[in-house]
Image: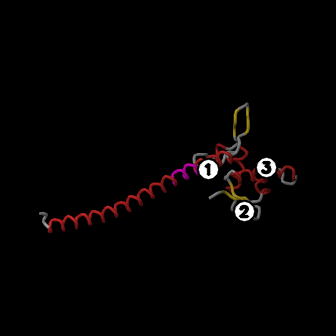
């Protein structure tokens, strides 16, 4: 005959194991759901990284052609790109802006670099160079039209 105390212990242990199994099944479902979410996040990240790389490649300025070779005369200001990478006349313009006591107008830069500022057709190419330096990150243009060096 079976011992009733042993049967009761077996039944109690089986109930404990059933409860533990429920907890583990729930925990396993949560782990699987989180793994699935991570897999989706990883795919989204890869897709977004690819899209950003494509956008950056499309937004990158197209270099000009000199002797059949691609060149960019006025490079973007980036770490590792020094002012001496600029053409000499652009270096003179930056030096003139830097020497000024504060932000300067195009005609003030023209006086320093030797442009005949009384003739508008001589001043406009200088203004264009200043704007190009602003666009490439070498200078900044204030709302009042004056130019200053980058901080």
**Can you say which quadrant of the picture contains the N terminus?**
bottom left
Question: Magenta stretch: residue 42 in it?
Answer: yes
Q: Mark 1 points at which residue?
A: 52
- Rendered location of residue 47, percent (x, y): 58, 49
Q: In terms of secondary structure, what is the magenta stretch mainly? A: helix
Dot in front, 2 or 3: 2
The segment highlighted magenta reads: 41-48
**Residue nearest the observer in this picture, 78 or 120:** 78
- Closer to viewer: mark 3 or mark 1: 1
Residue 131 horizontal side relative to residue 9, left or right: right
Check contact, mark 2 vs mark 3: CB within 8 A: no
The one of 116 and 105 positioned closer to us in this rendering: 105
Q: Which residue carries the number 3 mark?
A: 114
The residue tagged with tag 3: helix, strand or loop?
Answer: loop
Q: Which badge, 2 or 3, comes first in the chain's sequence?
A: 3
Q: On the rendered structure, is 130 left or right of 30?
A: right
Point 71% across, 51% down: residue: 133
Residue 138 location (% of width, % of height): 67, 52
Residue 74 percent location from the top left of the image: 70, 45
Q: Which residue is drawn at 79% across and 49% down?
A: 114
Q: Earlier in the sequence, mark 1 or mark 2?
A: 1
N-terminal of the pair, mark 3 or mark 1, is 1
Disc 1 and disc 2: Cα gap in Å? 30 Å
Q: Which of 2 and 149 is in front in this view?
A: 2
The residue carrying mark 2 is 142
Depth check, mark 1 against mark 2: the one in front is 1
Real-space Cα distance between discs 3 and 1? Answer: 44 Å
Q: Would you call the spot at circle 3 few (<14 residues within 10 Å), some (14-19), or many (20 or more)? A: few
Q: Which mark is residue 92?
A: none
Seen as rendered, the residue at the extreme front is 1
Q: How many labels does the image show?
A: 3
């Amino acid at each position: 005959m079976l011992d009733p105390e042993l049967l009761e212990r077996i039944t109690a242990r089986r109930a404990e194991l059933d409860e533990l199994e429920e907890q583990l099944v729930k925990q396993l479902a949560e782990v699987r759901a989180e793994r699935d979410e991570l897999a989706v996040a990883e795919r989204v990240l890869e897709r977004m990284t690819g899209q950003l790389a494509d956008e950056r490649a499309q937004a990158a300025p197209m270099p000009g052609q000199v002797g059949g070779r691609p060149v960019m005369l006025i490079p973007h200001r980036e770490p590792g790109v020094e002012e001496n990478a600029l053409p000499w006349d652009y270096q003179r313009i930056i030096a003139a802006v830097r020497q000024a006591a504060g932000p300067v107008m195009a005609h003030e830069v023209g006086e320093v670099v030797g442009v005949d500022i009384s003739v508008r057709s001589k001043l406009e190419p200088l203004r264009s160079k200043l704007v190009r330096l602003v666009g490439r990150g070498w200078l900044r243009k204030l709302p009042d039209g004056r130019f200053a060096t980058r901080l």
